[in-house]
């Protein structure tokens, strides 16, 4: 049985000056599903995520989240919606003047009436979930790249959003840290999260996604389950799959070393 | 004939490049004016709406204000001392040394204190705000503030603006005091003007409007410096190179604004505020 649609992106078009990035992007994300979004560099994968959370305004099209069109909303209205959407930035985007604990407390302090002790309990639980127990007082500069991303993930999910947008979370990570991050996301998946996973890292995406969408030339020509994508003979899919195989092979070699 | 044909395209290219560059400058200036105006509107819209982050303003006051005290003190002392020396020896030729306290006190209160302090702080505060906001921008921290359902205007712009509006007049007052003190010391040791006479003549010359007009000037400058720095920081791209360029641009633009607007503000005060 297919779960209800949480997010419905319809014919989204976006240009930056003369550069047309999206020529009509459409896809849906269902409840408790992780959709992986593949595409080459500069195809506008991150722009889709930024449009969903309202950091970019599409030129036309609709982005329906729980039935409401996000593209028509004012900044004040978007602030409320953003509480239900978690965004995991490529480099974590942790506030560098705040400690890990303060970074994770930030949305709770801003939007809830929880007491400081309740906030601390929640922050500690979240740090345990991402294998960063005890790193409360560290500043982002004192964290490794992988830890920064995991802390960014924790901050994005601490408000228990209805959908999580992952913007290339494994980019720039070594295989060990990639594996750890994917384990964390898989752990969240067992808790029933819904998400969009934008990535170049096809092996990781295959590991956690339920469906795959391929963004090419401003549109999404292919969207299917991971199984069907693996078996597909479509040349576009094949080119991505072969890249995946090459990456998996490289990854195995790196792990063997 | 051959020569003129050869130079024609070169001139055309030169003119094209010139007009393109001029056009870009005009476009950039208009973009800045529009951005400054829009950011100001956003600030006023959010200034009186909760939540209020008082602790962030206090943090900024410490960072922008308290840490500038020594810099302002040294500059104020040097300015007052140099002015006393220059006016003292300059007026000596005409027997006007005794006018030094009045001239120096008025000049410091009306012009030197506010303008020098603001110029210094355009460098210190302007560059500090610009580089911090620009770094936050290129590392997506500004996006993160928005993505977490909070407002960068409230968390970044307003605390820095309010802190600048409070810190600059207070620092100017401090610079005025130190500057006049420096002038008094020089007057005593170099010009043989005793301290009691200096104080009496200085107090005779200055009025309350001289003091508040100087402070009002610094508030105008503080507003411009902080909004400009935040706007430019929000609009920084090209990574770390962009951060460096932003900082330089903010300091130069703020300094030019201070000098130009000082003329108009002074003219305004001469017409309606100053007694003499």
Image: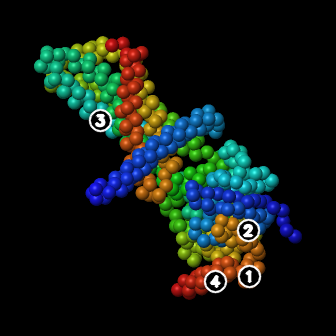
Q: Residue at x 73, y 68 (%)?
A: A34
Foreground mark, 3 or 1, reads 1
Which of A212 and B214 lies nearest the eye of the viewer?
A212
Q: Position of residue B157 (x, y in %)?
A: 53, 41
Foreground mark, 2 or 1, reads 1
Q: Residue at x 67, y 74 (%)?
A: A205
Q: Is there any visible trace of residue A127 in the rendered image?
A: no
Q: Residue at x 40, y 25 (%)?
A: B265
The residue wearing badge 2 is A34
Q: Are marks 4 and 2 in contact (CB under 8 Å)?
A: no
Q: Quadrant of the N terminus of chain B?
A: bottom left
Q: Chain of mark 3?
A: B
Q: Secondary structure at mark 2?
A: strand
Q: Secondary structure at mark 3?
A: helix
The residue wearing badge 1 is A232
**Pointers 4 and 1 within a single chain:** yes
Q: Chain of mark 1?
A: A
Q: Which mark is residue B75?
A: 3
Task: Give the Cα separation between the discs numbered 2 and 1.
Answer: 20 Å
């Amino acid at each position: 049985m297919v779960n209800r649609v949480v997010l419905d992106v319809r014919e989204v078009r976006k240009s930056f000056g003369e550069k047309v990035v999206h020529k009509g992007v459409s896809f849906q994300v269902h409840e408790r599903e992780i959709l992986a979004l593949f595409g080459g560099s500069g195809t506008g994968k991150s722009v889709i995520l930024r449009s969903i959370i309202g950091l970019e305004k599409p030129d036309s099209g609709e982005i329906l989240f729980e039935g409401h069109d996000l593209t028509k909303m004012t900044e004040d209205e978007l602030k409320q919606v953003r509480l239900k959407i978690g965004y995991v930035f490529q480099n974590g985007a942790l506030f560098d003047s705040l400690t890990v604990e303060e970074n994770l407390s930030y949305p709770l302090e801003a939007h809830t009436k929880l007491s400081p002790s309740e906030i601390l309990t929640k922050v500690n639980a979240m740090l345990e979930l991402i294998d960063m127990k005890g790193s409360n007082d560290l500043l982002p500069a004192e964290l490794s790249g992988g830890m920064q991303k995991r802390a960014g993930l924790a901050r994005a999910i601490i408000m228990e959003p209805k959908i999580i947008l992952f913007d290339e979370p494994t980019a720039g990570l070594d295989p060990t840290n990639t594996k750890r991050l994917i384990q964390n996301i898989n752990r969240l998946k067992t808790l029933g999260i819904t998400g969009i996973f934008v990535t170049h890292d096809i092996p990781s995406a295959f590991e956690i996604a339920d469906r795959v969408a391929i963004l090419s030339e401003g549109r999404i020509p292919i969207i299917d389950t991971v199984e069907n994508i693996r078996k597909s003979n479509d040349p576009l899919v094949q080119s991505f799959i072969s890249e995946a195989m090459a990456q998996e092979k490289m990854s195995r070699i790196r792990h063997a070393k | 004939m051959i020569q003129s044909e050869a130079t024609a395209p070169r001139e055309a290219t030169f003119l094209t490049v010139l007009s393109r560059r001029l056009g870009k400058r005009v476009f950039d200036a208009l973009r800045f004016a529009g951005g400054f105006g829009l950011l100001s509107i956003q600030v006023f819209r959010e200034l009186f709406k909760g939540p209020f982050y008082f602790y962030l303003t206090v943090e900024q006051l410490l960072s922008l204000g308290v840490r500038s005290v020594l810099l302002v003190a040294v500059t104020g002392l040097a300015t007052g001392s140099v002015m006393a020396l220059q006016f003292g020896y300059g007026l000596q030729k005409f027997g006007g040394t005794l006018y030094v306290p009045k001239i120096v006190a008025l000049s410091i209160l009306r012009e030197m204190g506010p303008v020098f302090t603001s110029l210094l702080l355009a460098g210190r505060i302007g560059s500090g705000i610009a580089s911090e906001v620009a770094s936050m921008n290129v590392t997506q921290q500004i996006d993160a503030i928005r993505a977490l359902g909070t407002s960068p205007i409230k968390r970044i712009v307003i605390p820095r603006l309010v802190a600048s509006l409070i810190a600059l007049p207070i620092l100017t007052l401090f610079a005025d005091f130190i500057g006049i003190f420096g002038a008094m010391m020089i007057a005593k040791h170099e010009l043989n003007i005793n301290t009691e006479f200096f104080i009496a003549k200085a107090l005779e010359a200055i009025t309350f409007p001289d003091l508040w007009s100087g402070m009002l000037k610094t508030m105008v400058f503080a507003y411009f410096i902080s909004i400009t720095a935040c706007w430019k920081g929000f609009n920084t791209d090209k990574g770390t190179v962009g951060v460096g360029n932003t900082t330089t641009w903010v300091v130069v633009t703020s300094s030019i604004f201070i000098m130009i607007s000082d003329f108009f503000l002074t003219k305004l005060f001469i017409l309606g505020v100053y007694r003499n």
